[in-house]
Amino acid sequence: MEHSCKIVEKDRMGDAVYMVLEAGHMVRASFRTPGQFVHIKCGDGLLLRRPISVCTCQEDEPDDLLAIAFEARGEGTGWLARREVGETLDVLGLLGNGFSMTREGRYLLVGGGIGVPPLRGCAQYTGGRSTAVLGFRSEDKVILRNCFEDECAKVLIATDDGSLGYHGFVDDLVRRELEEDRNYDGVLACGPKPMLKSVADVAAAFGVPCQVSMEERMGCGVGACLVCACDMKDGSRKHVCKDGPVFDAREVDWDA
C-alpha cells in the first residue's frame, strides 16, 4: 500500500495546488469507487502524514495516474505545496471507503471549496449524467469549473459574495434543483461540516438519499490510532479513515 509516486504535473488553481502523480499500479490494486483518499508523508521528522482526497484516477501503462488538489493550510501541506514536477512522494493508498454509486446512476454532486475536487471523480464515473452544484467564497477561488462543465450534464455555481453564479450557499441551489427534478439516485456531498449538514437536511426534505464525505484530522490513516472519530446518531463512534470518509448522512450525529 506504500508507494513512491513521481509528480508529473503541477498547477495552481485559485488557492489550491493541483498535482498529477505516477502511482505504480495503485489504482488497479485498490480503487473501489470515487471518494477514497491517499495519505502522503510531508517532510521528515515528526510530521504526521496528510490525508488528501483523490480528484481523479486513471489506469495507464506503465504507471497508473492519480490527481489530487489541496490547499496549503499548515506545515505539512505547505511542504507538499513546495514540491515540484520530477520529485517523488511517499504515498499510502488508495484508502477509505468512497461513495456508494453505480456507473449507470445519475447523481447531484455538491461540493464546497476544497471539497469540490473529489466530486470530479464522481462526475467521470457516471459518464456525464450527473449534475454538479459547486460553492466557493468568490470567483477567484473557483477551481475545476471547466472540467465539471465537460463531464456533467449541468453545472450550477454559488459564491458567497455573488461574484459568480448564484449569490448564496449551495444548499439553496440544491433545494431549487430538487424542486424541479427529484429524479436523482442520490446526493453526494463533500465540503465543510456546516455545508454538509445543510445539504443533508435539504436532501432529506425531498426524500433523496444523501452521502457525505467527512473531514477529520487523521494520524495513521488505517484505523489504528483512533484519532479521526466521528459520532453517529446511534451513539457509536466510527473512524473517518477506516469506516469512511463517506457516510450515509442519516447516520451522522450533526449536533455532536
Image: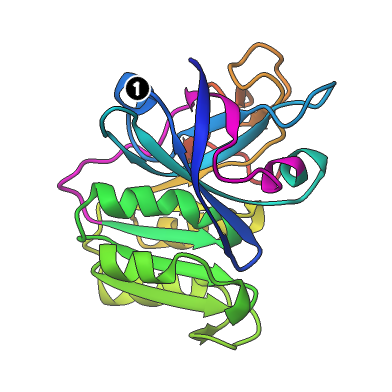
Q: Secondary structure at mark 1?
A: loop
Q: Position of residue 26 (x, y in %)?
A: 39, 24
Q: How many marks?
A: 1
Quadrant in the rendering for residue 86: top right
* Amino acid type indicated by mark 1: His
Q: Is residue 27 above or below residue 9?
A: above
Q: Is residue 233 visible?
A: no
Instruction: Give the residue at mark 1.
Output: 25
Q: Is residue 87 magenta?
A: yes
Image point (36%, 64%), residue name: 147
Q: Is residue 195 toward the left or the right of residue 23 in the image?
A: right
Q: Is residue 36 above or below residue 44?
A: below
Q: Is residue 177 above or below residue 71?
A: below
Name the quadrant of the C terminus. top right
Q: Position of residue 249 (x, y in %)?
A: 49, 44
Q: Position of residue 21 (x, y in %)?
A: 47, 38
Image point (33%, 49%), residue name: 122
Q: Is residue 99 above or below residue 142?
A: above
Quadrant in the rendering for residue 113: bottom right
In magenta, the rendered stretch is 79-106
